[in-house]
Image: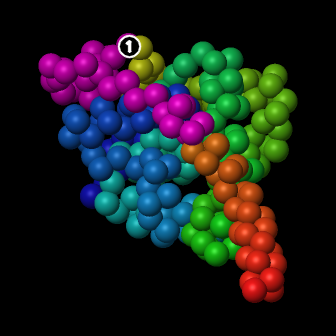
Amino acid sequence: MTLKIIGAAPGRTGTVSLMTALEHLGFGPCHHMKACIEKPQQTKWFLAAANGQPVDWHEVFEHYHSAVDWPASAYYKALFETFPDALVIFSDRPAEAWYDSVASTIYQVVPSLPKWLRRIVPHLDRWGQMVEKTIWQNELSGRFEERTFAVQFFENRLSEVQSVIPPEQLLVHSATEGWEPLCRFLDVAIPDIPYPRANEAARIQRAIKVLKALNYFPGVVAIAVVIAAVALSAL
């Protein structure tokens, strides 16, 4: 396979909807952050890239026809150099709304990962390192909590993409626009089903609550062991 479509926008810009749409249109499999969670080798490759090590992008995307979302979008320029015939899509949304969405969802994930779980699951620990290095350090310079800076980052990214990618190979697309501009850009027929509306915010927020609760698990186990020991000693 070869990468035919490169997503250049950060996460929380309708990338799950875009991934679903692209796969329905025949441009799948589509790479997404989910691939790194499900496939340890993907996390290893992107952690290496985040640390400045050389990565064979042909190998990384050997089984994909498209890629959207972080971490792939962080390397859209390198990907476009590697796959110069690819089309580039920037999934757009208002910058302020983007910031609020990221702040209440994915920005909370890595800090919520239980340390004990990261110790016993190496892949989870590497994934956390990859996300921290790729997104919060390399992309956002460790300054995401500075709202003005982060909003400007998003606006600058769009301007940068428009200056780097030839106009005939670039589509700036909002999920609210639906199928028509996307299908026209890709030169495919418009499906007779609604454009995907996959908002992951609620699911991510539920996952964060679970992760935070798991932080107390070792303590609960320790208390249970002490109680059991006391009870046994009284026998």
Res. 175 visible in picture: yes
Task: Measuring from the top left, give residue 109's x and y in whole percent.
Answer: 66, 47
Does 108 sit above or below residue 97? below
Residue found 55% across the figure and 19% down from its top: 93
Q: Which residues are magenta?
A: 177-206
Residue found 45% across the figure and 47% down from its top: 32
Res. 115 visible in picture: no
Q: Secondary structure at mark 1?
A: helix
Does 91 sit above or below residue 211? above
Name the residue beneath numbered marker 1.
177
Residue found 35% across the figure and 47% down from its top: 30
Which image quarter is the C terminus in?
bottom right
What's the amino acid at mark 1? Glu
Q: Seen from this angle, which residue lies furthest front?
A: 235
Q: Nearer the viewer, residue 141 or 230?
A: 230
Which image quarter is the N terminus in?
bottom left
